[in-house]
Image (spheres, rainbow, N blue to C red):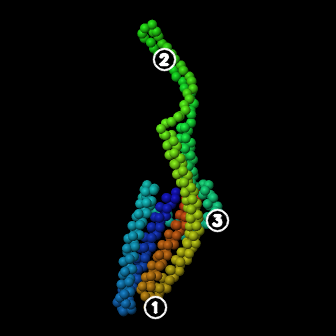
């Protein structure tokens, strides 16, 4: 579920990046035309025109890169779902930023230690390794078993012609004395593997705690980041409009307008990516805690 969700939003993010790159190129193209017209009538210097041309060429290159990244994202999602992805529903503008519940990082850590699937798998591996030590150590122990035999023999010559039957039932006791150190070596190997499994379990326990705490902090920071970038987007739009108006009356240069335009589109990309990162952080938090379910997919679909 996490892998598919990541691939889905990676493609949406790539689509946004391409859209912003195309819009940025178009805006810079218009600025370039304005610069050329104003230069022809002597209102600006040739350096402003050259700067606009340089920025336009850079925008073209970024558009090419954005288109390539979108194709790569599509390939990644296609690998998972087995068919070319089409008509992905975008994230709505009014989706809600929800804090983790409970809003206590220690509670999430405790949940992870109890429910983490990775930690549970490591625990099963540790228990299996311990049982293997006991099984191999049993090679030193005596064994007592029940033994039964039945025989049927036909005699076809001499004075004992006929058939004879023989049945034997008894107990068989075996006491290992020495087997060239094989059992001891096998026990030693199993003991080392058990120690390795124990260390792996401890590392997985620490990693589960780390992933849970990191994901929790990313969700909290993600909420603040989305809100801050939303405000930054409004501010950069206002700044770009002011720069354009100043350029038209001769109080701002073409370079200042271009920088304002780039900041605006950069803010759009960052805001778009931050929203996807917030959603993915919530998924990774629940994955680390072992509480991720298909209902979480249903909830995300309601935001699309």
Please state which of residues 119 and 257 is positioned toward the viewer in this rendering. Answer: 119
Q: Is residue 299 visible?
A: no
Question: Where is mark 2, residue-wise?
Answer: 152
> For the point 41% across and 80% down, which residue is it?
28
Report the disc number at residue 61.
none
Dot 1: few (<14), some (14–19), or many (≥20) neighbours within 10 Å?
few
First along the sequence among labels 3 and 1:
3
Report the disc number at residue 103.
3
> Gap between marks 3 and 1, in whole Å?
51 Å
Q: Is residue 73 visible?
A: yes
> For the point 45% across and 56% down, which residue is it?
80
> Gap between marks 3 and 2, in whole Å?
79 Å
Question: Where is mark 1, residue-wise?
Answer: 251
> For the point 37% across and 90% down, which residue is it?
45
Q: Are marks 2 and 1 in contact (CB under 8 Å)?
A: no
Where is residue 295 drawn, in percent x and y?
58, 57
First along the sequence among labels 2 and 1:
2
> For the point 38% across and 71% down, which residue is it?
64
Above-or-below relation of 304 to 144: below
Dot 3: few (<14), some (14–19), or many (≥20) neighbours within 10 Å?
few
Dot 2: few (<14), some (14–19), or many (≥20) neighbours within 10 Å?
few
Above-or-below relation of 103 to 129: below
Above-or-below relation of 158 to 105: above
């Amino acid at each position: 579920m996490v892998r598919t969700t990541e691939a889905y939003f990676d493609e949406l993010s790539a689509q946004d990046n391409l859209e912003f790159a195309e819009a940025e190129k178009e805006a810079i193209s218009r600025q370039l035309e304005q610069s050329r017209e104003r230069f022809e009538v002597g209102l600006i210097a040739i350096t402003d025109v050259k700067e606009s041309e340089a920025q336009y060429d850079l925008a073209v290159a970024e558009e090419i890169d954005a288109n390539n990244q979108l194709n790569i994202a599509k390939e990644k999602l296609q690998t998972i779902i087995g068919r070319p992805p089409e008509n992905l529903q975008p994230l709505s503008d009014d989706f809600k930023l929800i804090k983790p519940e409970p809003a206590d990082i220690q509670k999430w850590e405790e949940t992870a230690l109890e429910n983490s699937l990775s930690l549970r798998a490591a625990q099963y591996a540790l228990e299996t390794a311990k049982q293997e030590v006991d099984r191999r150590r049993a090679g030193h122990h005596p064994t007592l078993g029940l033994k039964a035999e039945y025989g049927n023999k036909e005699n076809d010559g001499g004075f004992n012609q006929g058939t004879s039957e023989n049945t034997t039932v008894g107990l068989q006791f075996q006491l290992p004395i020495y087997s060239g150190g094989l059992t001891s070596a096998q026990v030693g190997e199993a003991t080392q593997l058990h120690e390795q499994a124990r260390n792996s379990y401890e590392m997985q326990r620490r990693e589960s705690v780390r992933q849970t705490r990191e994901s929790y902090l990313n969700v909290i920071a993600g909420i603040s980041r989305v809100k801050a970038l939303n405000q930054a987007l409004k501010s950069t739009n206002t700044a770009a409009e002011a720069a354009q108006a100043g350029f038209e009356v001769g109080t701002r240069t073409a370079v200042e307008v271009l920088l304002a335009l780039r900041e605006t589109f950069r803010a759009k990309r960052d805001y778009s990516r931050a929203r996807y990162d917030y959603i993915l952080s919530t998924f990774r938090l629940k994955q680390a805690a072992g509480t991720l379910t298909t209902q979480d997919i249903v909830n995300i679909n309601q935001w699309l």
